[in-house]
Amino acid sequence: MWQEERYRRIRDQLAAFGQISVDRITEEFGVSRETVRRDLMELEQAGELRRVRGGAVPVKREDTTFGIRVTLRLREKRAIATTALGLLKTGMTIFMDAGSTSTIMAETLAAPHGLTDLNIITNSVDVARLLAERLDQPSRRFRVLMLAGEIKHEPMETHGAATINDIQRYRADVALLAPWGIDAQMGAMNYFIHGAEIARAMVRNADQAIILADHSKIGAPARSVFCPISEIDHLIVDEAATTRPGFTELAEVLPGLRVARGAATPE
Protein backbone atom coordinates (compact mmCIF):
# COMPACT_ATOMS: atom_id res chain seq x y z
CA MET A 1 0.00 0.00 0.00
CA TRP A 2 1.32 3.43 -0.98
CA GLN A 3 2.18 5.89 1.80
CA GLU A 4 -0.44 8.47 0.75
CA GLU A 5 -3.12 5.78 0.74
CA ARG A 6 -2.12 4.76 4.29
CA TYR A 7 -2.27 8.41 5.36
CA ARG A 8 -5.74 8.80 3.88
CA ARG A 9 -7.06 5.67 5.63
CA ILE A 10 -5.49 6.71 8.95
CA ARG A 11 -7.23 10.10 8.67
CA ASP A 12 -10.53 8.38 7.80
CA GLN A 13 -10.33 6.05 10.80
CA LEU A 14 -9.42 8.88 13.17
CA ALA A 15 -12.41 10.86 11.91
CA ALA A 16 -14.73 7.85 12.26
CA PHE A 17 -13.56 6.42 15.60
CA GLY A 18 -11.69 9.26 17.35
CA GLN A 19 -8.62 7.05 17.84
CA ILE A 20 -6.56 4.41 16.08
CA SER A 21 -4.20 1.70 17.33
CA VAL A 22 -0.87 0.55 15.93
CA ASP A 23 -2.08 -3.06 16.07
CA ARG A 24 -5.19 -2.27 14.03
CA ILE A 25 -3.24 -0.39 11.35
CA THR A 26 -0.63 -3.16 11.14
CA GLU A 27 -3.29 -5.82 10.69
CA GLU A 28 -5.55 -3.95 8.25
CA PHE A 29 -2.81 -2.38 6.12
CA GLY A 30 -0.48 -5.39 6.05
CA VAL A 31 2.62 -3.37 6.97
CA SER A 32 5.20 -3.58 9.74
CA ARG A 33 4.86 -1.87 13.12
CA GLU A 34 7.92 0.20 12.27
CA THR A 35 6.21 1.49 9.12
CA VAL A 36 3.12 2.37 11.15
CA ARG A 37 5.15 4.21 13.79
CA ARG A 38 6.94 6.15 11.05
CA ASP A 39 3.61 7.09 9.42
CA LEU A 40 2.16 8.26 12.74
CA MET A 41 5.31 10.24 13.53
CA GLU A 42 5.18 12.04 10.17
CA LEU A 43 1.46 12.79 10.51
CA GLU A 44 2.10 14.10 14.02
CA GLN A 45 4.87 16.37 12.69
CA ALA A 46 2.39 17.64 10.10
CA GLY A 47 -0.02 18.52 12.92
CA GLU A 48 -2.69 16.00 11.89
CA LEU A 49 -2.71 13.77 14.98
CA ARG A 50 -1.18 13.23 18.39
CA ARG A 51 0.58 9.97 19.19
CA VAL A 52 -0.40 8.18 22.40
CA ARG A 53 0.64 4.85 23.88
CA GLY A 54 -0.34 2.15 21.37
CA GLY A 55 -1.73 4.46 18.69
CA ALA A 56 -2.91 7.99 17.98
CA VAL A 57 -5.79 10.43 18.53
CA PRO A 58 -6.84 13.55 16.58
CA VAL A 59 -5.20 16.88 17.34
CA LYS A 60 -7.50 19.16 19.31
CA ARG A 61 -6.80 22.82 18.65
CA GLU A 62 -9.55 25.41 19.02
CA ASP A 63 -8.29 27.38 16.03
CA THR A 64 -7.24 24.51 13.74
CA THR A 65 -10.08 24.91 11.23
CA PHE A 66 -9.73 27.70 8.72
CA GLY A 67 -13.38 28.70 9.14
CA ILE A 68 -12.63 29.62 12.77
CA ARG A 69 -9.17 31.12 12.23
CA VAL A 70 -10.36 33.53 9.55
CA THR A 71 -12.78 35.15 12.03
CA LEU A 72 -10.24 35.62 14.85
CA ARG A 73 -8.36 38.88 15.56
CA LEU A 74 -9.74 40.56 12.45
CA ARG A 75 -8.96 44.09 13.62
CA GLU A 76 -5.35 43.16 14.33
CA LYS A 77 -4.91 41.37 11.00
CA ARG A 78 -6.40 44.29 9.08
CA ALA A 79 -4.06 46.73 10.82
CA ILE A 80 -1.09 44.51 9.95
CA ALA A 81 -2.23 44.23 6.32
CA THR A 82 -2.65 47.99 6.02
CA THR A 83 0.88 48.52 7.36
CA ALA A 84 2.22 45.94 4.90
CA LEU A 85 0.80 47.98 2.00
CA GLY A 86 3.36 50.67 2.81
CA LEU A 87 6.19 48.24 2.03
CA LEU A 88 4.85 47.34 -1.42
CA LYS A 89 5.36 49.21 -4.70
CA THR A 90 3.60 49.34 -8.03
CA GLY A 91 4.87 46.71 -10.46
CA MET A 92 6.05 44.24 -7.81
CA THR A 93 5.87 40.47 -8.12
CA ILE A 94 4.65 39.01 -4.82
CA PHE A 95 4.49 35.48 -3.41
CA MET A 96 1.57 34.90 -1.03
CA ASP A 97 0.88 31.70 0.90
CA ALA A 98 -2.43 30.35 2.20
CA GLY A 99 -4.00 31.10 5.57
CA SER A 100 -6.35 33.42 7.42
CA THR A 101 -3.91 36.34 7.62
CA SER A 102 -3.05 35.97 3.93
CA THR A 103 -6.76 36.10 3.12
CA ILE A 104 -7.10 39.36 5.06
CA MET A 105 -4.01 40.69 3.27
CA ALA A 106 -5.64 39.82 -0.06
CA GLU A 107 -8.84 41.63 0.97
CA THR A 108 -6.75 44.70 1.79
CA LEU A 109 -4.95 44.54 -1.55
CA ALA A 110 -8.30 44.14 -3.34
CA ALA A 111 -9.63 47.40 -1.83
CA PRO A 112 -8.90 50.71 -3.64
CA HIS A 113 -5.35 52.02 -3.06
CA GLY A 114 -2.49 53.39 -5.10
CA LEU A 115 -0.80 50.12 -6.07
CA THR A 116 -1.20 48.84 -9.63
CA ASP A 117 0.39 46.32 -11.97
CA LEU A 118 1.01 43.74 -9.24
CA ASN A 119 1.87 40.15 -10.10
CA ILE A 120 0.55 37.83 -7.38
CA ILE A 121 1.85 34.25 -7.26
CA THR A 122 -0.03 32.13 -4.75
CA ASN A 123 -1.10 28.64 -3.72
CA SER A 124 -4.21 30.05 -2.00
CA VAL A 125 -7.56 29.75 -3.78
CA ASP A 126 -8.97 32.56 -1.60
CA VAL A 127 -6.07 34.91 -2.39
CA ALA A 128 -6.41 34.16 -6.11
CA ARG A 129 -10.18 34.68 -6.02
CA LEU A 130 -9.91 38.02 -4.22
CA LEU A 131 -7.14 39.44 -6.40
CA ALA A 132 -7.98 38.10 -9.86
CA GLU A 133 -8.69 40.65 -12.59
CA ARG A 134 -12.03 42.44 -12.13
CA LEU A 135 -14.04 44.18 -14.83
CA ASP A 136 -15.18 46.86 -12.37
CA GLN A 137 -11.56 47.72 -11.45
CA PRO A 138 -9.62 47.58 -14.75
CA SER A 139 -7.17 50.26 -13.63
CA ARG A 140 -5.52 48.13 -10.96
CA ARG A 141 -4.13 45.67 -13.53
CA PHE A 142 -3.40 42.78 -11.20
CA ARG A 143 -2.13 39.52 -12.66
CA VAL A 144 -2.69 36.43 -10.53
CA LEU A 145 -0.80 33.18 -11.07
CA MET A 146 -2.15 30.10 -9.28
CA LEU A 147 0.55 27.61 -8.39
CA ALA A 148 0.14 24.03 -9.57
CA GLY A 149 -0.43 21.16 -7.17
CA GLU A 150 -2.93 18.93 -5.45
CA ILE A 151 -5.87 20.82 -3.89
CA LYS A 152 -6.53 20.49 -0.17
CA HIS A 153 -9.08 22.14 2.12
CA GLU A 154 -8.79 24.12 5.36
CA PRO A 155 -7.77 26.40 3.77
CA MET A 156 -8.35 25.69 0.07
CA GLU A 157 -4.84 25.60 -1.37
CA THR A 158 -2.47 23.74 -3.64
CA HIS A 159 0.38 21.80 -2.07
CA GLY A 160 2.90 19.05 -2.65
CA ALA A 161 5.88 18.52 -4.92
CA ALA A 162 4.17 20.09 -7.94
CA THR A 163 3.61 23.30 -5.98
CA ILE A 164 7.22 23.44 -4.79
CA ASN A 165 8.46 22.79 -8.33
CA ASP A 166 6.19 25.50 -9.73
CA ILE A 167 7.56 28.06 -7.25
CA GLN A 168 11.05 27.46 -8.66
CA ARG A 169 9.90 28.86 -12.01
CA TYR A 170 9.47 32.36 -10.60
CA ARG A 171 11.48 35.12 -8.98
CA ALA A 172 9.55 37.56 -6.77
CA ASP A 173 10.36 40.92 -5.25
CA VAL A 174 8.61 39.98 -2.01
CA ALA A 175 7.40 36.87 -0.19
CA LEU A 176 4.42 38.03 1.90
CA LEU A 177 3.91 35.24 4.45
CA ALA A 178 1.94 34.50 7.61
CA PRO A 179 3.44 32.10 10.21
CA TRP A 180 1.85 29.98 12.92
CA GLY A 181 4.58 31.06 15.31
CA ILE A 182 7.65 33.26 15.51
CA ASP A 183 10.42 33.77 18.04
CA ALA A 184 13.85 35.35 18.21
CA GLN A 185 15.74 32.05 18.12
CA MET A 186 13.88 29.98 15.54
CA GLY A 187 12.38 32.62 13.25
CA ALA A 188 9.07 32.17 11.40
CA MET A 189 7.47 28.73 11.68
CA ASN A 190 4.47 26.82 10.38
CA TYR A 191 2.49 24.19 12.29
CA PHE A 192 2.04 22.09 9.14
CA ILE A 193 5.01 20.63 7.28
CA HIS A 194 3.49 21.13 3.83
CA GLY A 195 2.84 24.81 4.57
CA ALA A 196 6.39 25.31 5.81
CA GLU A 197 7.80 23.71 2.65
CA ILE A 198 5.82 26.08 0.44
CA ALA A 199 6.72 29.18 2.48
CA ARG A 200 10.38 28.13 2.57
CA ALA A 201 10.48 27.82 -1.23
CA MET A 202 8.87 31.25 -1.57
CA VAL A 203 11.48 32.81 0.74
CA ARG A 204 14.30 31.24 -1.28
CA ASN A 205 12.92 32.69 -4.52
CA ALA A 206 12.16 36.21 -3.31
CA ASP A 207 14.37 39.25 -2.76
CA GLN A 208 12.62 40.14 0.51
CA ALA A 209 10.64 38.25 3.15
CA ILE A 210 7.83 40.15 4.91
CA ILE A 211 6.27 38.25 7.81
CA LEU A 212 2.75 39.14 9.03
CA ALA A 213 2.11 37.97 12.60
CA ASP A 214 -0.59 39.02 15.06
CA HIS A 215 0.15 38.86 18.80
CA SER A 216 -1.06 35.26 19.14
CA LYS A 217 1.88 34.12 17.00
CA ILE A 218 4.62 35.59 19.23
CA GLY A 219 6.35 32.63 20.86
CA ALA A 220 3.60 30.23 19.73
CA PRO A 221 4.80 26.63 19.32
CA ALA A 222 5.02 25.39 15.75
CA ARG A 223 6.75 22.49 14.06
CA SER A 224 8.82 23.62 11.10
CA VAL A 225 10.95 26.73 10.50
CA PHE A 226 10.51 28.26 7.06
CA CYS A 227 12.33 31.56 7.51
CA PRO A 228 15.14 32.00 10.04
CA ILE A 229 15.58 35.37 11.73
CA SER A 230 18.53 36.26 9.49
CA GLU A 231 16.30 36.06 6.39
CA ILE A 232 13.38 38.17 7.69
CA ASP A 233 13.51 41.65 6.16
CA HIS A 234 10.36 42.94 7.85
CA LEU A 235 8.14 41.60 10.63
CA ILE A 236 4.79 43.35 11.07
CA VAL A 237 2.87 42.80 14.32
CA ASP A 238 -0.11 44.43 16.04
CA GLU A 239 0.13 46.65 19.11
CA ALA A 240 -0.85 43.86 21.48
CA ALA A 241 2.27 41.94 20.44
CA THR A 242 4.42 44.45 22.32
CA THR A 243 3.15 43.03 25.62
CA ARG A 244 3.80 39.38 24.77
CA PRO A 245 6.71 37.41 26.20
CA GLY A 246 9.42 37.24 23.58
CA PHE A 247 8.61 40.53 21.85
CA THR A 248 11.61 42.36 23.34
CA GLU A 249 13.96 39.67 22.04
CA LEU A 250 12.40 39.94 18.58
CA ALA A 251 12.80 43.72 18.59
CA GLU A 252 16.48 43.34 19.47
CA VAL A 253 17.29 41.05 16.54
CA LEU A 254 14.91 42.44 13.90
CA PRO A 255 15.60 46.04 12.87
CA GLY A 256 12.81 45.65 10.29
CA LEU A 257 10.13 45.05 12.95
CA ARG A 258 7.08 47.28 12.57
CA VAL A 259 4.10 47.68 14.89
CA ALA A 260 0.73 48.20 13.19
CA ARG A 261 -1.05 50.94 15.12
CA GLY A 262 -4.75 51.03 15.84
CA ALA A 263 -5.28 47.32 16.51
CA ALA A 264 -7.10 45.86 19.48
CA THR A 265 -5.59 44.98 22.83
CA PRO A 266 -5.07 41.32 23.85
CA GLU A 267 -8.04 39.13 24.68
Image (cartoon, rainbow, N blue to C red):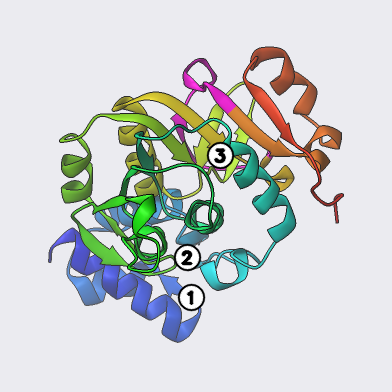
Mark 2 residue crowding within 10 angstroms, few (<14) / some (14–19) / many (20+) = many
On the image, numbered disc 3 is attached to which residue?
85
Residue located 65% across and 68% down the image: 71
> Mark 2 belongs to which amino acid?
Ala
On the image, numbered disc 2 is attached to which residue?
56
Q: In this view, does 67 lie above or below 231?
A: below
Element class at badge 2: strand
Q: Determine whether label 1 and label 2 are within 8 Å by CB.
A: yes
- Counting residues from the start of the chain, the first of labels 1 and 2 encountered is 1
Residue located 36% across and 66% down the image: 129
Q: Which of 229 and 144 is in front in this view?
A: 144
- The magenta segment: 218-234
Q: Where is residue 232 in the image (x, y as percent from the top left)?
A: 51, 23
Mark 3 residue crowding within 10 angstroms, few (<14) / some (14–19) / many (20+) = some
Q: Which of 223 and 17 is in front in this view?
A: 223
Residue located 34% across and 65% down the image: 134
* 62 lies left or right of 188: right
Q: In this view, does 244 lie above or below 206?
A: below
* 96 lies left or right of 265: left
Residue 73 can be seen in this image? no
Element class at badge 1: loop
Q: Which mark is residue 191?
A: none
- Counting residues from the start of the chain, the first of labels 3 and 1 encountered is 1
